[in-house]
């Protein structure tokens, strides 16, 4: 999955994240967190949905979010990862 989320095609990146939401585990979150930096908003949104599904955490609904709201949700996930990765 790690390679697919770095693919040049945003559709491939988004599909890789969808698969991760089905087959991924909480310890895959680090690779998914990286996708929050993606320049494509749909990839970011899918990354957030995947993180929600595999971790059970929820920092807001990215669907229909404004750019500022999406940035806030991304920042919350990144902050969560900084705390959780060392536990």
Image (tube, rainbow, N blue to C red):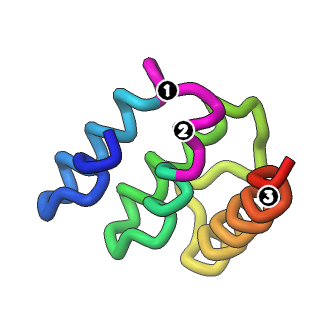
Kindly identify which residue carries mark 1.
Answer: 24
Q: Is residue 23 left or right of residue 56?
A: left
Between disc 3 and disc 2, the foreground one is 2
Q: Main secondary structure of the magenta part?
A: helix
Structural distance between the alpha carbons of marks 2 and 1: 6 Å
Residue 25 magenta-highlighted: yes
Q: Are marks 2 and 1 in contact (CB under 8 Å)?
A: yes
Q: Is residue 51 above or below residue 80?
A: above
Sequence order check, earlier mark of 3 and 2: 2
Q: Is residue 63 visible?
A: no
Q: Quadrant of residue 15?
A: top left
Residue at (30% x, 46% y) in the render = 14
Kindly identify which residue carries mark 3.
Answer: 80
Sequence order check, earlier mark of 1 and 3: 1
Determine crowd level at label 1: few under 14, some 14-19, many 20+ residues with C-alpha closer than 10 A.
some
Structural distance between the alpha carbons of marks 3 and 2: 14 Å
Q: Is residue 56 left or right of residue 41?
A: right
| Outermost bottom residue | 68
46 or 34: nearer the viewer: 34
Q: Provide residue 52's location: percent of width, then percent of height.
A: 65, 37
Residue at (25% x, 49% y) in the render = 3
Q: Is residue 20 above or below residue 45?
A: above
42 or 4: nearer the viewer: 4
In the image, the segment drawn in magenta is 21-30
Residue 34 magenta-highlighted: no
Q: Which mark is residue 28?
A: 2
Q: Is residue 11 visible?
A: yes
Residue at (13% x, 58% y) in the render = 9
Q: Secondary structure at mark 2?
A: helix
């Amino acid at each position: 999955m790690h390679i697919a989320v770095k693919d040049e095609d945003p559709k491939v990146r988004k599909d890789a994240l969808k698969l991760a939401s089905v087959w991924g585990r909480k310890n895959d979150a680090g690779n998914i967190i990286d996708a929050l930096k993606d320049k494509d908003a749909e990839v970011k949104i899918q990354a957030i949905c995947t993180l929600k599904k595999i971790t059970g955490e929820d920092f807001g609904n990215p669907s229909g979010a404004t750019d500022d709201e999406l940035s806030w949700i991304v920042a919350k996930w990144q902050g969560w990862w900084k705390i959780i990765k060392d536990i």
